[in-house]
Image: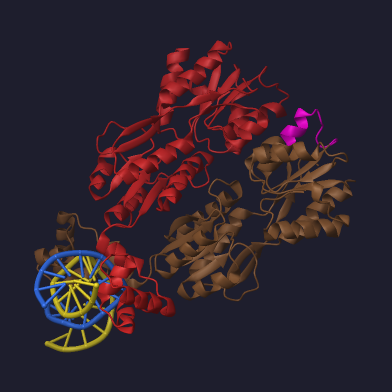
Chain colours: A red, B brown, C yellow, D blue
Amino acid sequence: MTNIKDIARLAGVSVSTVSRVLNNYKHVARDKRESVLRVIEEMNYTPNKNAIDLIRGETRTIGVILPYNNNPAFDQILNGILNKALEHDFSITVLPSIYSKEKEVEYLKKLKSKLYDGIIITSRANDWETIIPYTGYGSIVSCEYTQHKEIGCSYMDRYSSYLDAFQLLKNKGHYAVAFTTARIESNSTKQMIGAYKEVFGEFQPKYHISGCLCLEDGYKAAEHFLHLPERPTAVYANGDEVAGGIYLYAKSQQLKIPADLAIIGQENQPIGIGMGITTVDHQLTKIGEQAFSLVIKKSREKVKIPYHIVERDSV
Amino acid sequence: MTNIKDIARLAGVSVSTVSRVLNNYKHVARDKRESVLRVIEEMNYTPNKNAIDLIRGETRTIGVILPYNNNPAFDQILNGILNKALEHDFSITVLPSIYSKEKEVEYLKKLKSKLYDGIIITSRANDWETIIPYTGYGSIVSCEYTQHKEIGCSYMDRYSSYLDAFQLLKNKGHYAVAFTTARIESNSTKQMIGAYKEVFGEFQPKYHISGCLCLEDGYKAAEHFLHLPERPTAVYANGDEVAGGIYLYAKSQQLKIPADLAIIGQENQPIGIGMGITTVDHQLTKIGEQAFSLVIKKSREKVKIPYHIVERDSV
DNA sequence: TTGAAAGCGCTAACAT
DNA sequence: ATGTTAGCGCTTTCAA
């Protein structure tokens, strides 16, 4: 591999001069600049980026921690991040965590080891207390709200959106309402249950199924709900694919949507458009875009992205 | 920032000893190893990965060039890549190209600049002739077949799958068949047209619409097809979301699926399951997994991944 | 405008 | 078993 020293020698200049033309500095004589460029061309030289990153102490790369890499919601956030990264000429490294605390810490250590200029956490397993110390090594932005001043947030008002969705159902005359969530221990499950209580008074565990990520999960959840003695008349799914699965199972039981079962999904995904499912759109792409903007600004702002409900034919 | 020198000094040993314990080498006395570990702990030290990458000349990072970052097909491939990367403790950097030749070359230069150990090209705008020289700087694997010996391939037999899909339609009595593709200049459009000719004799431009990526594009394509004087009785869509859009438009015109219009999609995506759309599953996740395996083995094998047709209710 | 030289933080060959 | 030292390839003072 040819290096900067070779170029300098062949161009008859010093390495610092080569460095100067490489970085477009002024104060380089025309002829020297040209001869350096010629040699670079001839030798087909490209500077070693690791050496540059080592010296500069920055990499123009952002790491994105996300639990699942095959989940449409996280794909939407990632999409937003990539949009902005492309625009700002940053690279994005995807860090799949499967909600493993160890994996997450491993990734935070990579921030510390200077591989990334910052990290975006789309969702997490660790406590903020274990994450915050790493803000000393690069900017950390979360896609979930936290009051900790060290962390920038690009988030949505989950609680309020859950409230709206349940209220919509209640307004349509539904009182036996079921819902699905992804992780039982997650913040969003807690908020979902909270909102449920606020709207319907008491939480009934039989009307809640966790661990729902994809269409098949929704199908199974519906199977459970619809075999309950007092079967729900509506269900709020944590994603349109899960909602689609619920829809399919209901249909397989000859139920009419929404007459026999109302369904509301989340994140305005293609399947929801296709199947005409009402959905709560948290604008995840925008969340991702905003998260990226915050992380490169090293900002610790808390930016709330508005959600809206898209009414279709399933409620 | 504390560095290896500081640790050596504080532990009362040389940097090489510190390096040895860092890399789990043998021949380090118990007490020295322990005191080094203690100081590392106390100082909360993490080695600078850029320095290590610089010396080792490898980064355990693979770059993945993909044209769109919000396209379900490429998401499936990326998903497969990430599965394997996680397993093998490699990092994945996403390189969005929007089919720009310049962007692609920029990414290949990053391979040359030693940022990645290899690159996976899911789809490309450049000729192989301009890509191949970069195989000198790291392994390059393609998700599309090419006979060039320098390039490993994890691919599907597109032509044969197109043939099968068109034949399926023909067997069901369809002769006026339309189809959609993503990019007019792409290889897969060429193969699609070739397969069409082989099955139906002649290619009719009015039955082909390019530039279809999402549901909305499918909707518009259907609008076009269904207003043709001799409207097609079947359409093969380049993706299930596009197929979903076609389905929706047909429904909006009171057409029955498949009686009035047969629809076949591609890639077995959730929306297709939800809407009951027959699809050609090219197993993109497996393509991604295999591509990753090839790239880290620096293999130039050509591995064909089998496809299969999933029959549902739209044909 | 240019070059010499001192790092950036680490590994590894070599010597002991 | 351990330390010395010469790099890895580049940037950036500093002096000229």
**Residue A274 placed where, x, y %?**
66, 33
Q: Is residue A164 toward the left or the right of residue B312 in the image? A: left
Q: Is residue B38 toward the left or the right of residue B204 in the image? A: left
Q: Quadrant of the C terminus of chain A?
A: top right
Find residue A157 and report its image quarter. Answer: top left
**Residue C5 placed where, x, y %?**
14, 77
**Is residue A203 something that shows in the picture?**
no
Find residue A171 and report its image quarter. Answer: top right
**Residue B73 placed where, x, y %?**
61, 50
Is A144 situated above or below B178?
above
Q: Nearer the viewer, residue C4 or C10?
A: C4
Is A158 situated above or below B238?
above
Which residue extends farthest front?
Answer: A30
**Residue A298 placed where, x, y %?**
29, 44
**Is residue A289 something that shows in the picture?**
yes
Q: Is residue B133 toward the left or the right of residue A270 in the image? A: left
Q: How many numbered markers are drawn?
A: 0
Find residue A299 and report its image quarter. Answer: top left
Residue visible at 75% across and 36% down in the picture? B223
Q: Nearer the viewer, residue A219 or B185?
A: B185
Residue B90 sits inside the magenta stretch: no
Residue B257 sits inside the magenta stretch: yes
Identify the magenta region. B247-260
Q: Is residue B121 toward the left or the right of residue A296 in the image? A: right
Residue visible at 42% across and 27% down in the picture? A158
Q: Quadrant of the N terminus of chain A?
A: bottom left
Residue visible at 47% across and 71% down in the picture? B138
